[in-house]
Amino acid sequence: MSPLPEQPLSPLDGRYRAAVSGLGQHLSEAALNRARVHVEVEWLIALTDRELFGSHRLDHEQARRLREFAAEFGQPEIDELAQLEATTRHDVKAVEYLVRAKLADLGLTSVSELTHFACTSEDINNLAYAITIGAAVRESWLPKLRAVIDALRQRAIDARHDVMLAHTHGQPATPTTVGKEFAVFVHRLDRIASQVEATEYLAKFSGATGTFAAHVAADDTQDWPAISREFVTSLGLVWNPLTTQIESHDWQAELYSRMSHANRVLHNLCTDVWTYISMGYFRQIPQAGATGSSTMPHKINPIRFENAEANLELSSALLDSLAATLVTSRLQRDLTDSTTQRNVGVAFGHSLVALDNIERGLGEIDIDRERLAADLDSNWEILGEAIQTVIRAEITAGRSSITDPYAMLKELTRGKRISQADLVAFIDRLDIGPEAKARLRTLTPAGYAGLASFLVGFIEQP
């Protein structure tokens, strides 16, 4: 058998590439190196702006060209870094040499020793990761999550009056509406999205063990913590003053836990929608040219939701692992985080694939209102809850002498199917006031959804 041409190993870079392509702008190795260059350049400019160690402030054009180099980081720089790292065997040192080479090109060799000045590699890395992960969340993952929430919100509003038999423990239960059930997921996901949006992206910039030792050795007259704080916050991050060699990654653990929580809520949505499809409550809309089964031509399989389930599970497995492992580093530093953080994009990617499938799947289902009505009409016994509750109110008001309404309705309805006529005959024999009796006679399963449609209003956009 002849060997294949070089192929992507991960489906994220193959089959699912279209759904995750934007992530490469933030969470690829190239994106990380671009952010590293950005951090190195900004640190050098911050030092020269203060004219430290006899340096002079870069003029406007020099600073512009240096920042342009970082901003336009592309394939030539990617290739050059690969060559440098082949020699250095150290990714951040290769970035330092790349910046030094650019300074030489720009005639700025007089400040080249301020490149990576007093930095440990993790000073650069933790800032770069915070920048790239934050951008991936804000520009890729959150917008897709919000798109799914918006799709759910619209479905909830559109179906707010579509009464549906509920199934607590998988058994017929007090009715709800399709819209209210969608609204529950909107409310849950909205909360988590807001928590993700409020994430603090922490960063440190304090040297080999977080003590500013090299900084003070070079110049003990400077307020290095203040300089560090100003530099970190200038990059849109939150300064962490107390760390070891590494930033402690607690913010990452918080973020990944919230994202994994969102994944699990979405997984719950998928299993519910899948179940409603299997019950016939939702119809799947045939897609032109699609095949459900290679042998059974009649089938339309709920593949969007099944695919989403699997990708959500993979994403959460990785996110949970990241959240658990990143918060531990032996003594002042070990390298376990170096490898794990390189998989952040994989964790995000599987979640994005799932979100894409859910959004598309929601557009490929419709409500079977006839099936909803038929199920409601076949389960009059669910009104036992309403009847015994009304009797209790009548007893309290002194209009009934019944002693155990729950037991009475349990005897009538538990494990049984009863008809409307059976229920009306039972109501007619009840010792309750005439108004309550008249109200119960008109009650139907389809009319017993309480405030379900009203509750949808809590997720409507203002």
Image: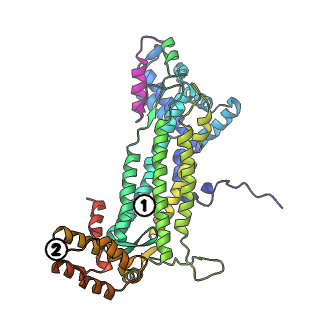
Per the image, label 2 sits on a secondary structure element best described as loop
What's under tag 2, amino acid-wise?
Arg
Which residue sits at x=57%, y=48%?
A: 318
| Magenta highlight on residue 232 | yes
Q: Which of marks 2 and 1 is nearer the N terminus?
A: 1
What kind of element bears circle 1?
helix
Residue 241 spot, x, y in % from top left: 43, 25
- The residue positioned 32% from the left and 79% from the top of the image is 446
Locate residue 160: give its quadrant. bottom left
Query: Is 336 left or right of 186, judged from the image as shown?
Result: right
Residue at which label 2 appears:
399
> Looking at this view, is 245 or 11 the one in front?
245
Q: What residue type is labelled 1?
A: Val
Depth check: give the residue in front, 5 or 432.
432
Tell me the magenta residue range.
219-240
Q: Residue 84: which disc? A: none
Image position of 383 (left or right of 208) = left
